[in-house]
Amino acid sequence: MIDSAIASSATSPESFGLRRPNVLIVAEDGSGAAAAGEAAALAGVRPIDRLPWDRAAACLGDHAVVDVLAIEAEGVDSERLDAVLPRVDTLARTIDARIIVALDPAQIDAVASHLFGPDVQLLCAPTLIDRVAAFNLAGFHALQLHDRVREAESERLRRLNEEVARIAQTLTLLASREDLRPSAERPGLVGDRRPAYGAAPAARSAPIDPQDIRKAIRSRRLREQFFAPALIEDPGWEMLLDPFAAELEDRAVSVSSLCIAAAVAPTTALRWIGKMSEAGLFQRRPDPFDRRRAFMALTDQARVGMEQYCQAVRQAGLAIA
């Protein structure tokens, strides 16, 4: 009964006077291709073709209009990833398309070394609802970008609002079909806006001891022995502490290591990394010794903020938390 309700709710954007986004799927014939096709149907986007991995590098540019590139990378070997993903990145940048990649947790570094940024969604071992949400986000961008037809602004906004309502209805019905998971594993926004920290910058004092940062991280991990992690998660702060301590220790932090430090589901962690990169707190750096891996480092803005925070905590006689 719920399945039929989902199907009936998946009204295409065309019913609102909007063009359905075109999706090109790269996947081998099997469960990944089937899952991508099912999610695309529920999201109301249009799969225009499916390319197997052995043809993808040569055929990616053969389609006239592509809004979303859906890459099913789970189980694909590193050699094929290295051959195809750079082509995906180049094409997406050329035609202003969004990228969705379904991958295994073990592939995080290999994929992130080629594909990362605000136009890329990385989904680790995704569920159906993860895939539908990703298609909806990517497809909605395409609607905003390409469907600026000659009509009154109020009419265009009305149609886009109806499309948002359709997306919300589909996701709500999907959520009711699946077992609800901890908030750390749910797709969607990764955080709310909060007031900016307004304290005056602290004066510089003695160098910061990285062990003080590591103690704070261990203390935060201890909380999980007594409370459900989903109730006390704070991935953004965890992700600032870990690379800051690593920088003080003159070490580099890979994307996969940063996901582990966040102590949340990998897809959620990747979403946070993307959000914080857009906010100017993280920057990606290639590994000079391994092209299949990328490092995440604090930007100057984030580094100064962490230093000032630690100095302010020290001056107040408090522990880093």
Image (cartoon, grey):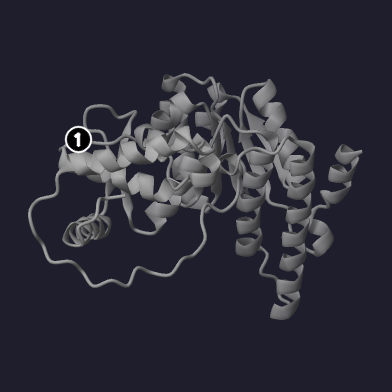
When the figure is inspected, residue 29 is found, relative to residue 84, above or below; the finding is above
Pick the residue in front: 246 or 74.
246
The answer, for residue 91, to whether it is visible in the render is no
Name the element at disc 1: loop
The picture quadrant where one finds residue 256 is top left
**Which residue is labeled 1 in the image?**
251
> Of the residues shown, which amino acid type is indicated by label 1?
Arg
Residue at x 19%, y 39% (from the top left corner) = 211
* Residue 190 place in picture, x, y as percent: 52, 52
Residue 306: x percent and y percent? 25, 55
User: Residue 108: percent from the left, percent from the top?
Assistant: 43, 31
The residue drawn where x is 41% and y is 40% is: 262
Judge left or right: residue 182 versus residue 200. right
Residue at image position (22%, 32%) is 288
- Foreground residue, 118 or 280? 280
Vertical placement of 200 versus 146: above or below?
below
Report the side of 247 relative to 165 (left or right): left
Quadrant assignment for the N terminus: top right
